[in-house]
Image: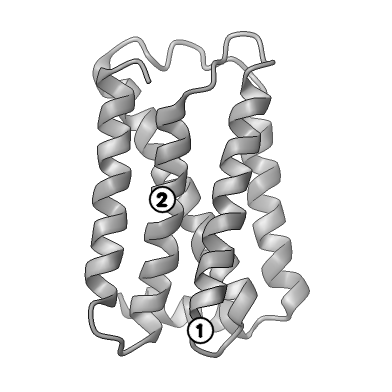
Amino acid sequence: MRAFARFLGWFASAPTFVRWGCVALEMAILWWASSGPIGGAHASWLRAFVHNLAHVLAYAAMGAMAALACSGARELRASERATAVAIAAAYGVIDELHQRFVPGRASALSDVGSDLFGAVFGVMLVHALRSSERGAWRLAALGLCAGIACAVLGTFTAW
């Protein structure tokens, strides 16, 4: 956890263009990854769950990076937390719409939910690590639980 906190400190103190560049780089990587067919990733429930959970983790990273890009080295304001979640969630919607037009791919509402709650988890994790606000860790845990619930729903239902 200390190594992660040190990394957050380094990333937060990086120049603004570097922080936003990392957010854009992750968006480009996700776009590239979703531009090809899945290739049997849903052959079993376990592989489908891992695929759906990857949404949570990818968008947690994007939300965390966007939050740090917004705030830099100072504590996150509520408006910056909301902006970071909105950026990551909006990109999740854009990427799901993109996948509708990729042969062998489909878009799913559960993926959008996993993206949204992954972003909430990432932003609230950064907030909890950098704040003494009461309840910040509970909100991060709630975001993670909601993201996992969306991954489970995406695995075992058709929404």
Display colour scheme:
one colour
First reached walking from the N terminus: tag 1 or tag 2: 1
Is residue 42 found left or right of 102 in the rendered image? left
**Residue under circle 1?**
9
Q: Residue at x 54, y 21 (%)?
A: 107
Q: Which amino acid does label 1 sit on?
A: Gly
List x then y, in percent, for residue 57.
Answer: 41, 48
List x then y, in percent, for residue 74.
Answer: 54, 90
Nearest to the observer: residue 107 or residue 20: 107
**Residue under circle 2?**
118
Image quarter (top left, top right, bottom left or bottom right) of the C terminus:
top left
Q: Which residue is drawn at 41% across and 50% down?
A: 118
The quadrant holding residue 51 is top left
Where 82 falls versus 50 (above or below)? below
Note whether residue 34 is visible: no
The quadrant holding residue 21 is bottom right
